[in-house]
Amino acid sequence: MIVREIFLTFLKLGLTAFGGPVAHLGYFREELIRRRGWLEEAAYADLIALCQFLPGPASSQVGFALGLARGGLPGAVAAWTAFTLPSALILMAVASGAAMIDASILHGLKLVAVAVVAQALWGMANKLCPDRERAAIAVGALLVLAWVPGSSGQILALIAGGLAGYRWCRPVSQSTGAALSIPVSRRLATGCLIAFVALLGGLPILAALIHSPGLSLVDAFYRAGALVFGGGHVVLPMLESSVVAPGWLDQDTFLTGYGAAQAIPGPLFTLSAYLGTAINGVTGAALALIAIFLPGLLILLGTLPLWSWLRDRPHARAIMAGVNAAVVGLLASALYDPVWTSTVSGPLDVAIAAGAFVALTRWQVPPWQVVLGTAVAGSLLVG
């Protein structure tokens, strides 16, 4: 009965939660903390802090943990499934029918991606690079990616950012004093951490040895999900290097899906369902969807029992501050290539993208309305 309640509650959220991860956390607080009392306010704040500290999609991790607190592992699976399924199914349908969408509308969706990534970069730079040290780390990450493009450069930039953060960043511990108590046994936590590391290191080896398209797909999406710090939009450069660089998809198809993902409720990581469908139909969608979410959920289960200890360690927070600053550099690189270089081809494109950016950042227009307006503008003005 509890699992059914969790599923229906999160299904409602999955159908109505527009606006991205920060908005999702607000919906969760209103529906599950204030109205239903699933956690204390202070414990919810501590849970958000943990999920922002870890790699992976923060809002989906928070939802998974709330389901776990309410109904154990079955409740956690029900929460994740119900919150993820609506947007995943919509994006699978978009991918299946992309060939029937007018080219000018597709171009409008790509221009949406320019505005959305610029908005994410602006917000993250203000939040994650508030001082000279972290701004320098972001620029350094951008330089690393200029010298070493692709996924290897992204990993190198994140490692360098963490080392620089350990050396130069000393953020004050932000302990809330809350007792975040979500039952996870030490045995389960240890097993999840081992599985997280084993899959991250083992999947590339298996993919190289076996040469299976399905295994290669799982490896690419698992690696992307395991290395995303700082917000859902950071998945863009990770996925672009994973699916466009090997030639699985072209950049136009990739950016069309990213633009379409802004118009629907639910987590941005369900972009993986669109990409998986475009690569290998329903099977590809299922593999990509599970693979990209799995690492974030594994590391959440593995870290929950350790959080009260970890949150009060200044060195751990310093490393994460450096990694998050490097993430800003990764997103800046993605804004230029592929988002800008493959989309903006003239002054009219610049004007449409700038209008969408202003609508998002200054007029506070809901993202789905910006997507529709930009698609129409692309159809009327560009087409």
Image (tube, grey):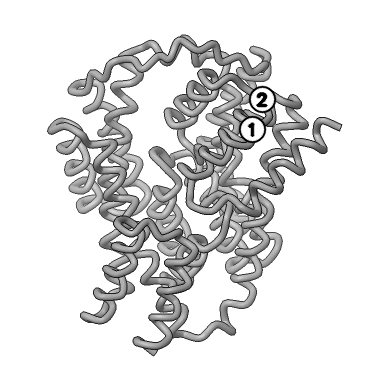
Disc on res. 38? 2
Instruction: Determine the residue located farthest toward the right in the rendered image.
Output: 1
Residue 13 point in image, percent of width and height: 64, 46
Query: In the rendered image, which quarter is residue 228 located in?
Result: top left
Confirm or deny contact between disc 2 and disc 1 (CB under 8 A).
Answer: yes
Q: Considering the numbered disc 1 on the image, is that residue within a helix, a strand or a loop?
A: helix
Residue 44 point in image, percent of width and height: 54, 24
The residue singled out by tag 1 in the image is 32
Residue 41 point in image, percent of width and height: 54, 22
As shown in the figure, which amino acid type bears the numbered disc 2? Answer: Trp
Residue 85 higher or lower than 99, as above or below: above
The mark that comes first in sequence, 2 or 1, is 1
Give the position of the C terminus as an image quadrant.
bottom left
Residue 208 visible in the picture: no
For the point 48% across and 52% down, the residue is: 19
Residue 4 or 369: which is nearer the viewer?
Answer: 369
Residue 105 visible in the picture: yes
Residue 255 higher or lower than 273, as above or below: below
Q: Residues within 10 Å of mark 1 (few under 14, many from 20)?
A: many
Q: Considering the numbered disc 2 on the image, is that residue within a helix, a strand or a loop?
A: loop
As shown in the figure, which amino acid type bears the numbered disc 1? Answer: Leu
Give the position of the N terminus as an image quadrant.
top right
Residue 192 higher or lower than 255, as above or below: above
Instruction: Determine the residue located farthest toward the left in the rendered image.
Output: 132
Residue 51 point in image, percent of width and height: 49, 30
For the point 36% across and 17% down, the residue is: 174
For the point 37% across and 59% down, the residue is: 116
